[in-house]
Image (cartoon, helix red, strand yellow):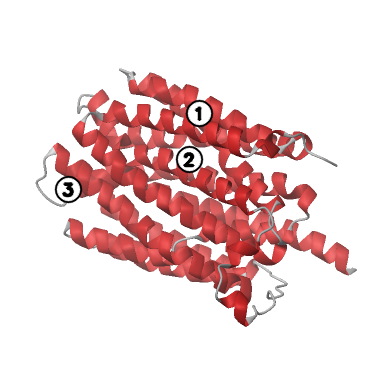
Amino acid sequence: MDDAQETQTLWRRNLHILWFCSFIVGMAFSEIMPFLSLYVSSLGHYTKAQVTMYSGLVYAADFFVGAIAAPLWGMVADRKGRKLMLLRTSLGIAVAMGLMGLATHVWQLIALRSLQGVFAGYIPNAQALIAAQTPRKYSGAALSTLTTGGTSGNLLGPIVGGVLAQIFSIRMTFFVTATLLLTTFVLSWVLVKEDFKPAPKPTHAAKRTNRLMAVPNLKLIVLLLSSTMFVQFGNTSISPIISLYVKELMHNVGPITIVAGILAALPGISNIIAAPRLGRYGDHHGSGRVLLFGYIFATIMYFPQGFVTSVWLLGILRFMIGISDGALFPEIQTLLTKNTPVALTSTVFSWNQSFQSIGNMLGALLGGWLAGIFNYNAVFFSTALLMLLNLALLWWLAPEIRRPATA
């Protein structure tokens, strides 16, 4: 087998393995994410406003630390390899998750979420590895396919977590999550192969500047990184309140955790169907066009979620959000890949993770704050307006993304 054939085989093989590992990671995280606010409420006697505030802090702690740590890990990845980062994050988060199941006070939970932020980033590092190995003409389809791995896990995780929480306890989901992440560590260690060639050591002058400044089209990259932040802000502002919103819509009667888990999983179904198709369309007709469609569709779908009076209608609208997510995240990553030198892939993707963490942190804090001051529907309205603002920024400041793909 010559070098070209070996490279072709390597990236496809790693794509399959990392799809499965991303599936496990997605399932592990989504097992507990929809119920963190309920877990917080079980750790003390809190008012509604206190629960939303503490829930926001618990969500935000991980992402605040992750935003600081991600660029540092990205520089290490470009010099030492992306596989090492996969091992680092899967093992570190497994330990943090297991300890969360032993928490007895909300501040312990916040501290452990902060520890998790130090080791966060399995899926972004998997994306960076695939982006670096995949030929550019296949990058849209490859990254969109990889995205469906985490999305599929996100689909199954809340249902599994909801059943575990209903039959056993929410604490049990943390221990299951830790076990799944340890499995991912072993699979990544044994099966993922990386023919890594470190980036050249920076000169003395380059060391004093941010490596991100070496990207040719820096303006577009910064706009795309900001877009990641805005999209994640919108998604995460809803995460801390979705189970509480379901509880209110169900009038605190019935299997709330199971219903909340199903609603949290619904976007994953449409995402799995839509993301690969949108990725292939973007490779042929322009990733930017798919990205713009995602913003328009998301804006249309978020607004009515603030008006619903039944979990059935909320479920339909949450299902539709999966289509917009399938257009937004993979296409942002594809545009980042196509506009970044291979040697700087991990650096740019680590900054993408950092902006995503900032969006997570701000979304969790402001989402909980808005719900506490106004009501849950205010969170959906603000998210729709944010998607519209992000669309306007890209339309005016990055006109090149509206151009069709070139051969």
Residue extending farthest to the left is 45
Tag 1 residue: 298
The mark lying in front, picked from 1 and 3, is 1
**Which residue is rendered at x = 32% and y = 32% of the image?**
379
Disc number for residue 231: 2
Q: In x, y percent, where is residue 218?
A: 62, 54
**Side (left or right) of 304 relative to 139:** left
10 Å crowding of disc 3: few (<14), some (14-19), many (20+): some
Residue 284 placed where, x, y %? 78, 36
Query: Can residue 374 be seen?
Result: yes
Between the residue at mark 2 and the residue at mark 3, the CA separation in whole angstroms equals 30 Å
Q: How far apart are marks 1 and 2 (CA)?
A: 10 Å
The residue that mark 3 highlights is 42
Q: Which amino acid does label 1 sit on?
A: Ala
Q: Is mark 3 on a helix, strand or loop?
A: helix
Of helix, strand and loop, which one carries label 2?
A: helix
Characterize the local packing of mark 2: few (<14), some (14-19) or many (20 or more) Cα atoms within 10 angstroms. many
Q: Foreground residue, 259 or 201?
A: 201
The vertical placement of 123 against 2, above or below, is above
Depth order, front residue of 59/221: 221
